[in-house]
Amino acid sequence: MVVWPGMLTGALFLTVVLLSVKIVLMRKSVREIKKALDEKLTSDTNTLIDLAGRDRCMCDLAESLNGQLRILREKRHRYEQGDLRLKEAVTNISHDLRTPLTAICGYLSLLEQEEKSEAACRYLKVIRERTEALSQLTEELLAYSVAVSDADRTDYERFSLNEALEESISAYYAALKGRGISPDISIPDEKVLRCLSRSSLSRIYGNVIHNAIKYSDGDLKIILHTDGTAEFSNHASGFNEIEAARLFDRFYTVETARKSTGLGLSIAKVLTEQMGGSITAFYADGVICVRTYFPEASCSGDGPGNAAHVRCDIRKGTAIAADDFSGGGKTI
């Protein structure tokens, strides 16, 4: 009678040991699957998940995940090939449209010099506007296709954001005055140095300023902070939060900017993210604010740093005032 409890205890103990070993092995297999899956999803590799253990359930799970990885790899490959072909097609179309558009503009200029009736002048004006809009769209399409396909930049250099911003503002000085806008600009005396592409940054600042000119009610406030943040804010009646959220969508334009291609801020977003920065837009109390941010990074090694999420501070319907800027600055 004493033997049976001893045997039962021994059997239970052996069962617990076996189950413990089984659990340990399964946990090890799960860790292997997790690690392998993370590697496959984050890297471009053709290898599949391979387990050291021989547990049937874990092997079935690994095989099921391998099947999904094969499907995902095939879809990713098709997407990359399709995206590449689309970029090439856009680039080729843009180049092919340039020559006939140049010829059309030339003949329009000659025709405008001829004697015409009032109706013919009116029709020619419409044709000129449509031709210029098409030319602008062609140039923006070409610029966008180049921007999205040129992720590996080699023209990074260390320079000050102060100088780049001042140059961009100067380039749009005539357009600002044409709209009756006298920008309120605050740039710090301290140089804000970053390792970026000078041409790309000029394009980013220029596109943001151009966008502000289109939607402004007659004001524009530009502030550069010492942390690499540049803010562009202006009153924009008829705007709303939904339109602000869609400003960076390709080909999106609001009702008040029908002549726009809708690619300017899309290009700015692509270029900003390629250089490790971030660009955001917010709207509140009648004020639209676009903010760009570039973190500090070395010109050697991995290049620009990772993008950081930033917010735009809009207070009581007015843009951030110059005296809110910490560290002092100069107003131009």
Image (cartoon, helix red, strand yellow):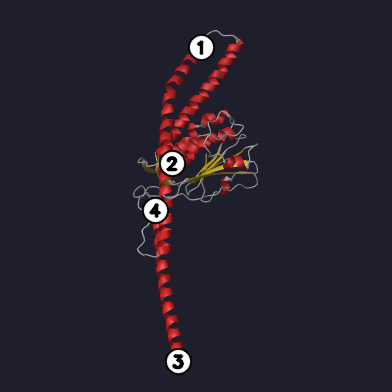
**Mark 3 and mark 1 residues within 8 Å of each other at the beta carbon:** no
Where residue 291 sits: x, y (%)? 53, 44
Amino acid carrying label 4: it is: Lys
Mark 3 residue crowding within 10 angstroms, few (<14) / some (14–19) / many (20+): few
Q: Do the residues labelled 1 and 4 touch (CB within 8 Å)?
A: no
Query: At label 2, which amino acid type do we have?
Result: Tyr
Residue under label 2, please give it: 79
Q: Is mark 3 on a helix, strand or loop?
A: loop
User: Which label belongs to residue 59?
Assistant: none
**Residue at the top extreme of this rendering:** 115
Question: Marks 3 and 4, how far apart in space?
Answer: 57 Å
Element on which disc 2 rests = helix
Residue 122 placement, left or right of 162: right
Of callouts 3 and 2, the N-terminal one: 3
Q: Looking at numbered disc 1 in the image, what kind of residue is underneath it?
A: Leu
Residue type marked 3 = Val
Q: Position of residue 206 (x, y in %)?
A: 49, 35
Residue drawn at x 44%, y 33% as measured from the top left: 143
Foreground: 300 or 90? 90
- Cα separation, mark 3 vs mark 2, equals 72 Å
Calculate the distance from the C-alpha at mark 3 to the C-alpha at mark 1.
Answer: 117 Å
Q: Mark 1 points at which residue?
A: 111
Compare marks 2 and 1 and give the one earlier in the sequence: 2
The residue indicated by pointer 3 is 2
Q: In which quarter of the image is residue 96?
A: top left
Element carrying mark 1: helix
Nearest to N terminus: mark 3 or mark 1: 3
Q: Do the residues labelled 3 and 2 touch (CB within 8 Å)?
A: no
Mark 3 or 4, closer to the camera: 3
Cα gap from disc 1 to disc 4, whole angstroms: 62 Å
